[in-house]
Amino acid sequence: MSIEYEEKLIATITEALKAIPAAPPVAVVADYLGALRSILHSFRASGIDTAKISAEMCGALGAKDIAGYVGLACELGAANHFRTLVPAQFKYRVHNASSDHDNGIPKSFDFSATVDGFTFNVEVKTFSRINGGGNQHPVKVFLPKAEMKALYAEMRTAGSGFSPNCTPAIGRFLADANVQLRRPENGLAVIVLCCDGFDEYADAMECLAGQHGLLSNNRKPVGDPMQPTPQELPNIDAVVVCVAGLHHYGLMDPDRYGAAFGNDLVLASGKSSWQFAQSLPVAVFLRSPPQRELEETFGKAFNLHNAMFSELLREHGGDIQSASFAMFNRALTG
């Protein structure tokens, strides 16, 4: 049964790509679909039923919900990263009985993986900044620094340093994940926030870790589910921000991908879309960092770029936006 759903998914993606005016090269599409087939096959070989995730991805594409498809693809890519890393210590879509609601609807988180004796319970969310409409466009990544900073200054609300649409969306994701996740006895409960572009990534980092961000120790609980504080999120230890959604948009929405790069780059590899380790993950802790051995294992397991980001943050005087773009430019130029 799983194989039938997988084949339907491949066919649905193929048809969806045919409808795109500026469809990616045939070789890139073949590479993308080949990597997806390999992931689904390896899941089945591990005893994991792929029917549900395949059906969900088909449903999203059938409804022309590209964002929904990308969200599921990001979940699958991150899950595959850990299934490959520790196949015998990996569990997919884990039921969390402690979070079941009175309405009888079961709660679960996306996956759990035990690496070097430490368990990571993970919930994956995808984040897209809501644009203001009209003639407004996302800020381009490779603008001159002065112009880039001026445009971001226009977007900022008084003293906040991030898009006004960013806080409610991320706050809602955190509140949802807090209900879904369960903190392991020896490890971390982590929400992976997959952004679909560099601007969204920079805004998310500012929203979370900025002076007035959601996770700032300067904030006190206010009982607002859209602006939760760390104290109001007891089931989450850390948020990992990445750009895992970007390359999926390189296939499903080439115009969006081109806007992110100023049309300077095109997607050269379909396989890379599924490789979570290449999505520039950076972790933000909700409370004091864990003991050293756990923190090191966390960094290796998620391929965290915290050391690079911290270095660039110092170079840019603590400006999270500038440090984020500097990290992207360094990664893109090698």
Image (cartoon, rainbow, N blue to C red):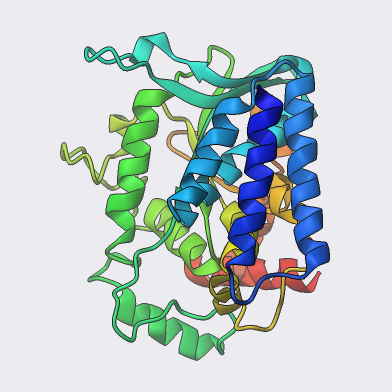
Residue extending farthest left:
223
> How many numbered circles does the render carry?
0
Residue at image point 33% right, 86% down: 135
Residue at image point 31% right, 45% down: 171
Instruction: Assign the C terminus to one quadrant of the image.
Output: bottom right
Q: Is residue 143 above or below residue 68?
A: below
Q: Residue 179 versus residue 240: which sits nearer the camera?
A: 179
Q: Is residue 124 above or below residue 322?
A: above
Residue at image point 73% right, 43% down: 36
Q: Is residue 27 above or below residue 114?
A: below
Residue at image point 31% right, 17% down: 105
| 223 sits left or right of 78 in the view | left
Rendering coords of residue 274 (x, y %): 71, 48
- One can see residue 326 in this view: yes
Q: Residue 314 versus residue 174: which sits nearer the camera?
A: 174
Where is residue 176, by image quadrant?
Answer: top left
Rendering coords of residue 151 (x, y %): 40, 84
Rendering coords of residue 149 (x, y %): 45, 82
| 22 sits left or right of 46 in the view | left
- One can see residue 304 in this view: no
Rendering coords of residue 322 (x, y %): 53, 73
Q: Residue 17 versus residue 253: which sits nearer the camera?
A: 17
Instruction: Assign the N terminus to one quadrant of the image.
Output: top right
